[in-house]
Amino acid sequence: MISHKKIYLSPPHMSGDEMKMIEEAFATNWIAPLGPHVDAFEQETADFLGVGAALALASGTAALHLAGELLGVGRGDRVLCSSLTFAATIAPFYHKGAECVFIDSEPGSWNMSPQALEAALEDCARSGKTPKAVIIVNLYGQSCDMDPILTLCNRHGVPVIEDAAESLGARYKGRQTGSFGKFSVLSYNGNKIITTSGGGMLLSDDGEAIARARFLSTQARDPALWYQHTTLGWNYRLSNVLAGIGRGQMRHIHQRVEARRRIFARYAEELGGIEGVEFMPEPHWSVSNRWLTVLTLRESPIFVLERLAGLDIETRPVWKPMHLQPVFENCLYYPHGAEQDVSADLFRRGLCLPSGSGMTEEEQTRVIEGIKEALAAARGKTKS
Ligand SMILES: *Cc1c(COP(=O)(O)O)cnc(C)c1O
């Protein structure tokens, strides 16, 4: 019998360097939400992305929350956000009582449609309600089409928050993602391309804003001998132990990107010839980190998901767009075209495949065979 170790979508991939960093933290007793690993992790990440300042945090969601805080997003303020994403992108703004408006994807990159964004921004200008932020998402490790999006946002005077939680190591026209927003956000959750088991980073060229975020994320303690507060904050810092894991992971980011791109290339080669099977495209301006390989079928892929689950292989449908979520049923939505709801279509037909950088060739063969069998079985059924 063949071995049946479960194949996960995107499990952590340790190198060994992480443990050395953890041991260093223990040896020096820096077991706190600050310390030399935190400082170095922030600096190394800022350098890697080419951004002025970075703040290590307990999660990507905390980083998004602080970005909203720094931009003064409050009750009734409007924010525009990519619809095709994970709920954490918008949750902190929803909790602030902001009016959430969702923007469709474009078919070429699956990310925010510049033409839908333009329609939304023009409506905002007409009604005299400038959004407080546009939140863009680099989905599944691929950059948005930054140039047209940033041009539109600049023209309307709206700051951009870049949710790069999934796209560390990906590039747009040669430049690292996570460096385009007024504020950019990374995540080190357990399923991301690198992980600290849980964590995040807020980045900006505005060093004063990052200093403010540092203050707010450390309980907003005024510089006094006693505990004094002119405002109140949050406890959002990343521990020095976890920052050590992050430093060990960062040393291998290039290999992790290469491994995921190689995994994508093999899926594309082995399955791309099958009728009806397509993969997330990569525009000429994009070098995706291929965090997850995502394919689309002509019909719902749930039968593939179920068959692979039976083989102990984890797959997932594409994110259910925010404009289709019950919690946002009363929110405005701008589709890519009058009759073209791109994100809804991707949700209906898309499936994320196991893409962990530590996946072996044999494991990937198991996934590929499983998909081929599922597709052949489905074809047999429709013929009979
Ligand atoms: C993972 C993720 C987040 C949230 O990051 P956490 O570190 O889990 O809080 C936000 N946005 C996107 C697109 C994500 O994939």
Image (cartoon, rainbow, N blue to C red):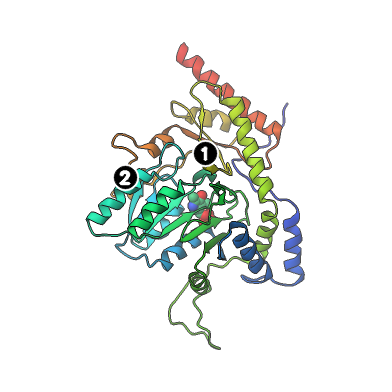
Counting from the top left corner in percent of width and height, residue 25 is at: 72, 67
Whether residue 325 is visible here, answered yes or no, is no
Whether residue 224 is visible here, answered yes or no, is yes
* Label 1 environment density (alpha carbons within 10 Å; few <14, some 14–19, many ≥20): few
Counting from the top left corner in percent of width and height, residue 177 is at: 54, 52
Asked whether mark 1 lies closer than 8 Å to ligand 1, one says: no
The residue under label 2 is: 334
The N terminus sits in image quarter: top right
Secondary structure category for the residue under label 1 = loop
In percent of the image, x 66 and y 29: which residue is there? 365
Q: Quadrant of residue 287?
A: top right
Q: Amino acid at mark 2?
A: Tyr
29 vs 320, left or right, is right
336 vs 280, left or right, is left
The residue under label 1 is: 284
Counting from the top left corner in percent of width and height, residue 39 is at: 64, 69
Counting from the top left corner in percent of width and height, residue 40 is at: 66, 66
Q: Amino acid at mark 1?
A: His
Relative to 246, residue 235 above or below? below
Report the label total: 2
